[in-house]
Image (spheres, helix red, strand yellow):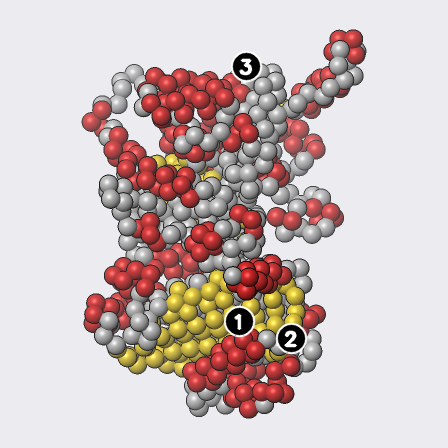
């Protein structure tokens, strides 16, 4: 209920948020009117029969059973006499033997096990068969094996849910065969970009952006992940820009995306951050996913990934593993049909994942419309993992039964699933062209040209330029060029200084690299300094402005979203969702809207004015200092993870004053000057927002240092 944003039972009833799988239309119309049920199935008669079978099993004569013990079940963990799991000792052992010994015979045994049980017991694709062609396709029309593997990828498994060694081994394997691995959630160690001595690369070809930038997760749609503090060691904390020992919570909703236009802006941001990379958008298979996929294509996404309901590590909640999402077969078929009918298929790749195991699975996914294929559990098992035999954390997401000859399968109708839209030959049914991202029109092309000496030779340069809100994502491709040449070290501070005047568009200075300073004399739109990566950003009204800056909004919503480093000084008020998921940036602002510092993990935020409600929700790290002149901040702060303190520590006072002084120097803020001129009077009015776990870890570290 919570993952759907529904907060009361009253709203949940009749909300039409479900899709039925395997129920016929007569039953749906009678009892669950308007609920989608696309492949038909059983009705009230079969449901009655199954209910009677359960009743008889529960009340059979004791003499027949000889025991009062309940059956083990095996719903989550594999049991010898329990419910069937597609990953079981037979399939696991055959796959592991095949990969360890490079035995094709063992792989064939694994594939036979997997395909047979898939056909008889577990999946929609198991109820499909191939049509035989009278004339086989000539081999010269078939891609070579080396080309086919380029269509394969490993799933987005986060560092932390699996260990470093397994994570890097998967990357090495994919790079060896020319396929792609995925960083998953939590970033990537930049040392992996340097090849090993033997030539192997641990660099994952796919980077998941920030902590929550999949639109959805197949294993837990509608929810963010959680990584317990005890799993965050020094290495994982360093990679994730967080504090070791402090729990990490990924935002379940995407507060910078409320429309296709917002999604299009994110895609544009990412394309600017790496023009040669493809931008993937991941969706969960569900009724209506085709319409969302059409929006992804219109928003200029390069790849749309349709993730099935199967898969996920033990970090996924039971409710999501078992009861959220749909089989990828339904999602891929709907996506293909909608994209083709709207002539949007030709410019986007369709990928799918969700317990793909064998060539048969890949072939059916291809026939339904997919061009690329992701696998996660199978690669992990091939490394030696036997989690489905031992893990008690709900890692198995298979186990529901139907069989081709089974009495419950007789009413299934796959006509909707297999429907091929009739369209003219001019309408593409697969990806035939590249998306036009319009990068050639970006202002950054001019910036790169003017800053070439700074980029190449680190020579200081200062520019003065106009800007308008038509100029989106300014500074991002410039940062890409810097990162490409100089890596994470980027440039010395203030190597490039650009002074803009006017109204900046969306995503100004997104992902700005260290060594770049950008000033705006004017105002800016949403996503200002999003993903700030070491750069410095300053914004203030024009000197001739007649309004009072600290009483007026100067930047839009979702400022500093997912920033990892750098500084931002904002003379004026910011909108909602300020510094959400900030994990390293320092900033001073003169007021913020609702949900400030949500899910923050590191960094420092100073607010010289009022805040909206729900401040610090999910904030597990970092520090915030709020000037509470009217004594109302406590009622606006979310107390679940943070405590409120006075600023009494000399180090806190020194750091706070230093940031406010820098804010005054950079922006000329009269509000900052007022605070500094009356410091002794104003300091007691500051409230320090401190996450409990973060404080505990800092105290433990201080005690350890003192003990040494």
> Would you name the residue on which mark 1 appears?
605
Residue 50 visible in the picture: yes
Of badges 2 and 1, nearer the viewer stands 2
Give the percent coordinates (x, y) of residue 471.
36, 70
Q: Give the CA separation, mark 3 to mark 2.
A: 71 Å
The secondary structure type at the circle numbered 3 is loop
Residue at the spot 42% in from the left edge and 58% down from the top edge: 266
Q: Mark 1 Cα within 10 Å, few/some/many (few <14, many 20+)?
A: many
The secondary structure type at the circle numbered 2 is strand
Give the percent coordinates (x, y) of residue 538.
42, 77
The secondary structure type at the circle numbered 1 is strand
**Numbered badge on residue 269:** none
Residue 468 is left or right of residue 141, and the answer is: right
> Would you name the residue on which mark 2 appears?
646
Q: In which quarter of the image is residue 130?
A: top left
Residue 260 visible in the picture: no
Q: Give the CA separation, mark 1 to mark 3.
A: 63 Å
Give the percent coordinates (x, y) of residue 176.
28, 37
Residue at the spot 39% in from the left edge and 67% down from the top edge: 534
The single residue placed furthest to the front in the displayed view is: 708
> Would you name the residue on which mark 3 appears?
405
Residue at the spot 58% in from the left edge and 19% down from the top edge: 80
Q: Which of marks 3 and 2 is nearer the N terminus?
A: 3
* Label 3–label 2 contact, CB within 8 A: no
Residue 467 is left or right of residue 459, and the answer is: right
Of badges 1 and 3, nearer the viewer stands 1
Q: Mark 3 Cα within 10 Å, few/some/many (few <14, many 20+)?
A: few
């Amino acid at each position: 209920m919570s993952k759907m944003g529904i907060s009361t039972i009253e709203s949940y009833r009749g909300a039409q948020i479900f899709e039925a799988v395997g129920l016929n239309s007569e039953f749906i119309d009678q009892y669950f009117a308007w609920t989608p049920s696309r492949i038909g199935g059983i009705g009230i008669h079969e449901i009655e029969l199954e209910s009677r079978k359960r009743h008889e099993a529960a009340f059979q004569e004791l003499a027949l059973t000889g025991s009062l013990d309940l059956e083990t079940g095996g719903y989550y963990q594999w049991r010898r006499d329990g419910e069937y799991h597609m990953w079981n000792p037979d399939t696991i052992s055959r796959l592991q033997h095949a990969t360890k010994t490079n035995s094709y015979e063992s792989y064939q045994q694994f594939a036979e096990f997997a395909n047979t049980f898939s056909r008889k017991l577990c999946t929609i694709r198991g109820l499909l068969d191939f049509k035989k062609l009278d004339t086989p396709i000539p081999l010269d029309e078939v891609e070579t094996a080396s080309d086919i593997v380029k269509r394969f990828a490993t799933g987005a498994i986060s560092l932390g849910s699996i260990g470093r060694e397994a994570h890097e081994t998967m990357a090495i394997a994919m790079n060896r065969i020319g396929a792609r691995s995925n960083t998953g959630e939590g970033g990537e160690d930049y040392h992996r970009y340097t090849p090993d001595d033997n030539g192997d690369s641990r660099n994952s070809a796919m980077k998941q952006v920030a902590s929550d930038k999949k639109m959805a997760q197949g294993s837990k749609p509608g929810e963010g992940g959680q990584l317990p503090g005890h799993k965050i060691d020094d290495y994982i904390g360093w990679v994730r820009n967080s504090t070791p020992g402090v729990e990490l919570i990924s935002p379940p909703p995407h507060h910078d995306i409320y429309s296709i236009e917002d999604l299009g802006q994110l895609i544009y941001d990412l394309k600017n951050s790496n023009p040669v990379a493809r931008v993937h958008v991941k969706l969960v298979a569900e009724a209506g996913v085709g319409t969302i996929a059409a929006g992804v294509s219109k928003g200029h996404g390069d790849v749309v990934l349709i993730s099935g309901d199967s898969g996920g590590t033990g970090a996924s909640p039971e409710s999501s593993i078992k009861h959220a999402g749909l089989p990828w077969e339904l999602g891929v078929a709907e996506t293909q049909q909608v994209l083709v009918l709207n002539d949007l298929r030709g410019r986007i790749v369709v990928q799918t994942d969700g317990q793909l195991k064998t060539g048969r699975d890949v072939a059916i996914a291809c026939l339904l419309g997919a061009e690329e294929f992701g696998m996660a559990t199978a690669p992990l098992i091939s490394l030696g993992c036997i989690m489905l035999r031992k893990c008690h954390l709900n890692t198995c997401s298979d186990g529901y039964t139907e069989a081709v000859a089974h009495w419950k399968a007789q009413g299934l109708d796959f006509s909707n699933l297999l429907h091929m839209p009739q369209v003219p030959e001019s309408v593409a049914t697969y990806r035939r062209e590249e998306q036009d991202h319009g990068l050639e029109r970006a202002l950054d092309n001019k910036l790169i040209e003017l800053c070439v000496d700074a980029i190449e030779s680190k020579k200081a340069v200062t520019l003065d330029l106009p800007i308008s809100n038509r100029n989106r994502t300014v500074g991002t491709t410039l940062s890409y060029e810097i990162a490409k040449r100089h890596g994470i070290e980027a440039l010395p501070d203030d190597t490039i200084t650009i002074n803009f005047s006017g109204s900046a568009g969306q995503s100004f200075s997104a992902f700005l690299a260290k060594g770049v300073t950008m000033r705006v004399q004017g105002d800016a739109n949403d996503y200002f300094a999003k993903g700030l990566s070491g750069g410095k950003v300053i914004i203030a009204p024009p000197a001739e402005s007649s309004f009072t800056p600290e009483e007026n909004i100067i930047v839009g919503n979702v400022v500093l979203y997912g920033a990892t480093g750098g500084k931002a000084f904002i003379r004026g008020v910011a909108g909602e969702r300020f510094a959400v998921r900030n994990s390293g940036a320092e900033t001073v602002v003169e007021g913020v809207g609702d949900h400030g510092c949500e899910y923050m993990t590191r960094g420092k935020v100073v607010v010289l004015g009022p805040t909206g409600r729900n401040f610090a929700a999910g904030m597990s790290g970092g520090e915030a200092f709020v000037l509470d002149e009217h004594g109302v901040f406590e009622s606006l702060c979310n107390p679940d993870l943070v405590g409120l303190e006075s600023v009494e520590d000399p180090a806190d006072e020194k750091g706070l004053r230093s940031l406010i002084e820098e804010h005054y120097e950079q922006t000329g803020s009269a509000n900052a000057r007022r605070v500094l001129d009356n410091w002794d009077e104003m300091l007691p009015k500051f409230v320090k927002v401190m996450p409990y776990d973060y404080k505990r870890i800092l105290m433990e570290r201080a005690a350890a240092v003192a003990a040494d």
